């Protein structure tokens, strides 16, 4: 009560001074009205009020703890003040707890110092620091695609990561992407399983597979294909197609054995005119290459004796004589061998006389004639 009394007095002396309220708590923060009752020695009393202002000037006690957080698939993490608080307290109660940093990204991986500010209901504040360790433990999301590759003329093919990767990603960035197989040969024809391994910037790895279908679409290379041929039909005006597949030089990027067909087939009989011959070479993988040429067959060059002409002797070794009917002129005589090759042309300038032709070896080359 002495805190409230400010010089109370009585003419005959004061017996008692009593306050109606003497104890205060946090619930009484602010202004409180109290009553002082003064009683003198004769029992006379007088009262007076006063204002007691209750203040809280004690700072909160901020207690923190270190924390480890893991970034999510988006590379983000959020820390609440309550996760850092480790039992902070105040005599009259805490109003707020605030962190200076609460959001973390891939840029914050590692140790980060955060400050927790604790403010009580009277506005008194205290701070404390803690360490937030940010980690990235999420491996990359791998997306692959199956592909088909064609072997080249040397029987090889190569791929790289970009051929297999189909939009792989990581929350904090990809460091490396590696394929376990990049080169293929004829031995790899068909489906091959390849593995794509991705390592992110924090060393987390993930692996996914894809199918590489290796195909050979190159036909064989054919050289020494016959050129166009001129032939002479036999005495029946028929030429028999030969087998022209022998002697072909065939190479291929993957195959060493081949299927060779000829159209028309060997043994086919053709008559006068042009016949197109096609040779088809197919490798072990079904790829085909064709070469073609033309055979031109002419009629046999054997002697044909018209009724108006006579030729003797037949056979002959040195000379033959052509006797013609009266009035028939001989312009020229052309001699062919049995291959159809023109050997000699003798010009008689429309002679009306009988004609003698020297067929001795002095005038003709060695050959077969009919």
Image: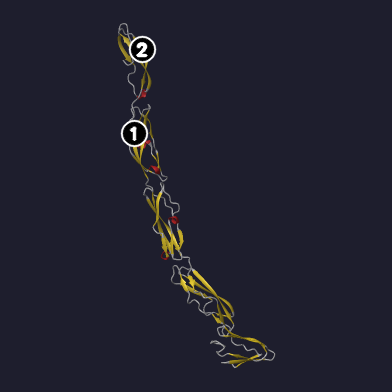
Q: Nearer the viewer, residue 369 or 172?
A: 369
Residue placed furthest toward the bottom: 313
Q: Is residue 168 left or right of residue 356?
A: left
Above or below residue 45? Residue 256 is: below
**Dot 1 surroundings within 10 Å: few (below 14), some, or many (20 or more)?**
some
The residue beneath circle 2 is 47
Mark 1: which secondary structure? Answer: strand
The residue beneath circle 1 is 128
Q: Is residue 260 visible?
A: yes
Above or below residue 3? Residue 184 is: below
Quarter that holds the C terminus: bottom right
When asked about the image quadrant of residue 353, the answer is: bottom right
Q: Is residue 368 left or right of residue 47?
A: right
1 or 2: mark nearer the eye: 1
Q: Nearer the viewer, residue 90 or 203?
A: 203
Above or below residue 133? Residue 15 is: above
């Amino acid at each position: 009560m002495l805190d409230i009394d400010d010089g109370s007095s009585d003419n005959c002396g004061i017996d008692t001074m009593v306050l109606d309220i003497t104890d205060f708590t946090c619930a009484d923060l602010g202004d409180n009205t109290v009553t002082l009752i003064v009683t003198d020695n004769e029992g006379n009393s007088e009262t007076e009020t006063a204002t007691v202002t209750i203040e809280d000037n004690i700072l909160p006690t901020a207690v923190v703890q270190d924390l480890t957080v893991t970034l999510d698939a988006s590379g983000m993490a959020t820390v609440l003040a309550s996760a850092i608080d480790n039992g902070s307290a105040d005599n009259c109660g805490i109003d707020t707890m605030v962190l200076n940093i609460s959001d973390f990204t891939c840029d914050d991986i590692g140790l980060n110092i955060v400050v927790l500010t604790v403010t009580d209901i009277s506005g008194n504040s205290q701070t404390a620091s803690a360490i937030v360790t940010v980690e990235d433990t999420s491996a990359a999301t791998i997306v692959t695609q199956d592909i088909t590759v064609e072997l080249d003329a040397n029987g090889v093919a190569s791929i790289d990561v970009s051929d297999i990767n189909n939009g792989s990603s990581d929350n904090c960035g990809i460091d490396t992407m590696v394929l376990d197989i990049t080169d293929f040969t004829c031995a790899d024809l068909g489906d091959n399983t390849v593995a794509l391994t991705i390592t992110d910037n924090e060393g987390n790895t993930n692996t996914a597979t894809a199918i590489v279908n290796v195909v050979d679409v190159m036909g064989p290379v054919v050289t020494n294909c016959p050129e166009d041929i001129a032939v002479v039909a036999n005495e029946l005006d028929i030429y028999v197609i030969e087998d022209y597949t022998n002697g072909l030089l065939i190479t291929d990027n993957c195959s060493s054995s081949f299927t060779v067909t000829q159209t028309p087939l060997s043994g086919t009989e053709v008559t006068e005119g042009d016949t197109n011959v096609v040779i088809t070479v197919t490798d072990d993988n079904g790829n085909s290459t064709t070469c073609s040429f033309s055979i031109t067959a002419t009629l046999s060059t054997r002697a044909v004796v018209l009724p108006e002409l006579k030729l003797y002797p037949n056979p002959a070794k040195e000379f033959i004589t052509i006797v013609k009917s009266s009035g028939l002129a001989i312009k020229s005589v052309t001699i062919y061998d049995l291959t159809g090759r023109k050997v000699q042309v003798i010009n008689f300038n429309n002679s009306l006389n009988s004609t003698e032709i020297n067929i001795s070896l002095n005038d003709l080359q060695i050959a077969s004639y009919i």
